Structures are given as structure tokens and as C-alpha cells.
Image (cartoon, rainbow, N blue to C red):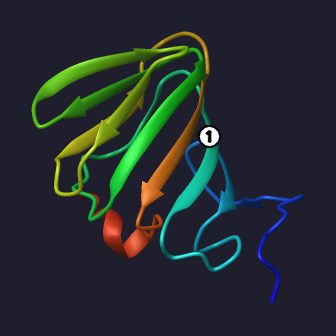
């Protein structure tokens, strides 16, 4: 077994909302369960339902802006800014702005659709 994993083709997560999700490390790409690392691009006007994830998450914005509602507080992340959210927080991610939000997400443990707890 090698002491490294070289990712040359991230797993592109199928979506129906126009958001690009490229998982470089994690359950879908290489079976890593301790953490996941994904590059994402959320188009203008994108949003998803509230969720209460069972994982901590770091979001790092590369370009554009991303709006995050966390436990009732509204935060706007701009390029070069980051946010750490703890597991169990009620969160809603969106991009109500006119340009795409280009960002990275690191989840600990790894992102899982079963652990995100999205509201209907």
C-alpha cells in the first residue's frame, strides 16, 4: 500500500441544480472517510435547503461570493475569506449574487449524503 494518493481526475458529483462539485478526496472519490476535499462552483441564483450536517466544514472562497445562513446569522464570504462551521449547526448555503462562487470545501469526517441532513 502506498503512503500517498495522487488524484488526477476528481469525482464529479452528479447534480440537478447547476452546481459543479469535484471531489478530490473523500468517500466518493477514493473511499477516504476521515475527511473530504472538494472544489465547487455555485452558479448565480443557486441555493440549497437548510441542513444540519453531522460533520465540521471549512469553506474557502477563491472568487465570487457565497452566502451562508448559520444558526440564524447571515454571513457573506468573499474571495480570500474562509469559514469554519461545527457539526450540528443549522446551515443554508446560497449564491444570490451575479457571478459564480468558486470555492473549496473540507469536511471532517468526509461528506456523506446520509450525514448532511437536508430539510425538505
Circle 1 crowding by C-alpha within 10 Å: few under 14, some 14–19, many from 20: many
Depth order, front residue of 16/117: 117
Q: Quadrant of residue 74?
A: top left
Q: In which quarter of the image is the N terminus?
A: bottom right
Tell me where residue 70 appears, x and y as whole percent: 19, 35
Tell me where residue 116 appears, x and y as whole percent: 33, 63
Residue at screen point 46% across, 64% down? 111
**Does residue 42 sit above or below 112 in this rendering?**
above
Q: Quadrant of residue 117?
A: bottom left
Left or right of 36 on screen, residue 75: left
Per the image, the residue denoted by label 1 is 40
Tell me where residue 41 appears, x and y as whole percent: 63, 34
Residue at screen point 50% across, 64% down? 35
Residue at screen point 51% across, 76% down? 33
Q: In which quarter of the image is the C terminus?
A: bottom left
Q: Quadrant of residue 29?
A: bottom right
**Does residue 98 sit above or below 48 in this rendering?**
above
Give the farthest residue toward the bottom: 1
Depth order, front residue of 13/23: 23
The residue tagged with tag 1: helix, strand or loop? strand
Amino acid at each position: 500500500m502506498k503512503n500517498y494518493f495522487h488524484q488526477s481526475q476528481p469525482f464529479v458529483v452528479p447534480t440537478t441544480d447547476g452546481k459543479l462539485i469535484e471531489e478530490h478526496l473523500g468517500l466518493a472519490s477514493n473511499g477516504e472517510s476521515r475527511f473530504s476535499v472538494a472544489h465547487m462552483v455555485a452558479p448565480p441564483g443557486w441555493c440549497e435547503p437548510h441542513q444540519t450536517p453531522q460533520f465540521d466544514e471549512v469553506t474557502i472562497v477563491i472568487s465570487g461570493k457565497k452566502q451562508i445562513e448559520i444558526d440564524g446569522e447571515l454571513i457573506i464570504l468573499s474571495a480570500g475569506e474562509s469559514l469554519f462551521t461545527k457539526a450540528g449547526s443549522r446551515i443554508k448555503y446560497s449564491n444570490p449574487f451575479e457571478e459564480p462562487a468558486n470555492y473549496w470545501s473540507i469536511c471532517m469526517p468526509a461528506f456523506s449524503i446520509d450525514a448532511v441532513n437536508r430539510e425538505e
